[in-house]
Amino acid sequence: MDNSNTKSPSLLGAVRSASWSIGLTQEELARVESTVIERRFAPGSLVCRKGEPVEYWYGVIEGLLKLSSDAESGKTASLTGVPPGGWFGEGSLLKSEIRRYDGVALRDSRMALMPRQTFLWLLDHSISFNRYLLTQLNERLGQFICLLESERLLDTDARVARCVATLFNPVLYPGLSRKLAVSQEELGYLTGISRQRVNRSLKILQDAGYLSVAYGGITILNLDGLRKLGS
Amino acid sequence: MDNSNTKSPSLLGAVRSASWSIGLTQEELARVESTVIERRFAPGSLVCRKGEPVEYWYGVIEGLLKLSSDAESGKTASLTGVPPGGWFGEGSLLKSEIRRYDGVALRDSRMALMPRQTFLWLLDHSISFNRYLLTQLNERLGQFICLLESERLLDTDARVARCVATLFNPVLYPGLSRKLAVSQEELGYLTGISRQRVNRSLKILQDAGYLSVAYGGITILNLDGLRKLGS
DNA sequence: TTGGAATTGTCCATTTCGCGACAATTGTAT
DNA sequence: ATACAATTGTCGCGAAATGGACAATTCCAA
């Protein structure tokens, strides 16, 4: 159930291959590389917590995590999953506000942490970094609008389909395998639908040939089909 | 039921007082002013249509419109309302894709249209315009994430409350009156809840003193209370 | 002033989902 | 190999929203 990229990537490798780093000058890149640090997180542990001051911009080197928010009612809502190659937290950094949701490791994960100061320095110095952020925010906005639209217009099965497809956004998360090691309960949190109902939807989507269901996760067979379902 | 600003603002006045124009140079502003045009729209008419190529960046000078999306199933979902002072469409312009949702005038509205070429020119020339866009996209992203979070975590009444509060975002839509001339059916589209259920929620919120319900719309009495409801 | 259109308030039947429960299955650590 | 934990598959009940229907109200224009 592992990703197919068996080679475990280094911190600097992850930084250099990140899509936001290709437009940086040598000087800028050097500054990034000298300040970014790596940290490991066990499954279930909190990478960052709602309400904390925002100290870092986070990148997933290896593993998988989710951004989620809990209510005092006990309910939990996962907003999105972040696979390797994904970076998050720029929103709160830009607004210089406290963090608005939790980051939770779903598996053993290695994270790259860029200090806020470096992030803001890039923001002030690099035009290409600005352009990257613009693209990233725009893409994420599109993702959430699409999600909301689905919630309003589509039936439950199609919502599950789109939500799964969302996790494979090629702009936000480049070069991802087709396997997603996520439990159906977690998919329930991601979609906002009960586990039992997700289970039924997955079976329907499997019968229709869009994906295949296995014990610890699912495999996407027809990504484009999932996206377009019910639209 | 009109806004309290009785003076009808001019096109150039709207441009010059827009929050994205204050950082522009004389030259940049001149280029904007010589290319931006004005157009009027009757209630119910389409300002822009899903699927069209994106030719303009739109600003609301006067009136009110909604961004929405219809499904072939006949359902309709309003994504957000845009009051005077609000600008939209930058997402599709940045991606140079076809338009992803309809813009519909809810009342007689006067719109400012900035040609795509001018928009892209600003994007390439003005740092402050880039920064504005970053802020705008970030704010909008926050808005939609908040909306999605509400949908997952909160009960129906609180969702209606937050959705209404969303329409008064001071960053996206500065200087707005407390009256919102929108039918309950429209609020249903905006919240993704049936008109009948919205009706009940509004009455509850009114009894709790957060707003007051009148024939053609509502008046906000406690904006901060609406925002924080159920959190 | 009056008629018609839009909007609101309320009823109810139907649909759908959430949630608790529990057995069956699969994976993992000892 | 075996026990234990995590996950999946499936029921059924109760709660809640949807959507149709229709009367009452309000607004607007002739």
Image (cartoon, coloured by chain):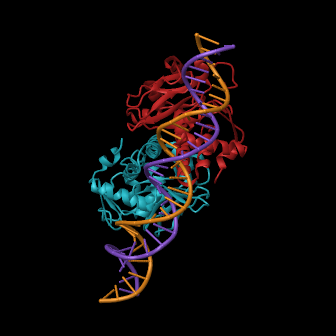
Chain colours: A cyan, B red, C purple, D orange
A47, above or below D29, in the image = below
Q: From where the camera sits, is residue A63 visible?
A: no
Which of the image's four quarters has the N terminus of chain B?
Answer: top right
Where residue B154 appears, as percent x and y from the top left, is: 58, 53
- Residue at figure coordinates x 46%, y 41% from the top left: A138
Residue in the foreground of this view, choosing between B26 and D24: D24
Q: Count of labels shown?
A: 0
- Residue at figure coordinates x 56%, y 43% from the top left: B143
Q: From where the camera sits, is residue A203 visible?
A: yes
- Residue at figure coordinates x 54%, y 51% from the top left: B149
Q: In which quarter of the image is residue B73?
A: top left
Locate residue A209 relative to residue A84 in the image: left or right.
left
- Residue at figure coordinates x 43%, y 46% from the top left: A24
A188, above or below B25, in the image = below
Residue in the foreground of this view, choosing between A48 and B98: B98
Residue in the foreground of this view, choosing between B85 and D2: D2
Where residue B50 appears, as percent x and y from the top left, is: 41, 31
Where residue B196 appears, as percent x and y from the top left, is: 57, 41
Where residue B99 appears, as percent x and y from the top left, is: 41, 32
Which of the image's four quarters has the C terminus of chain B?
Answer: bottom right
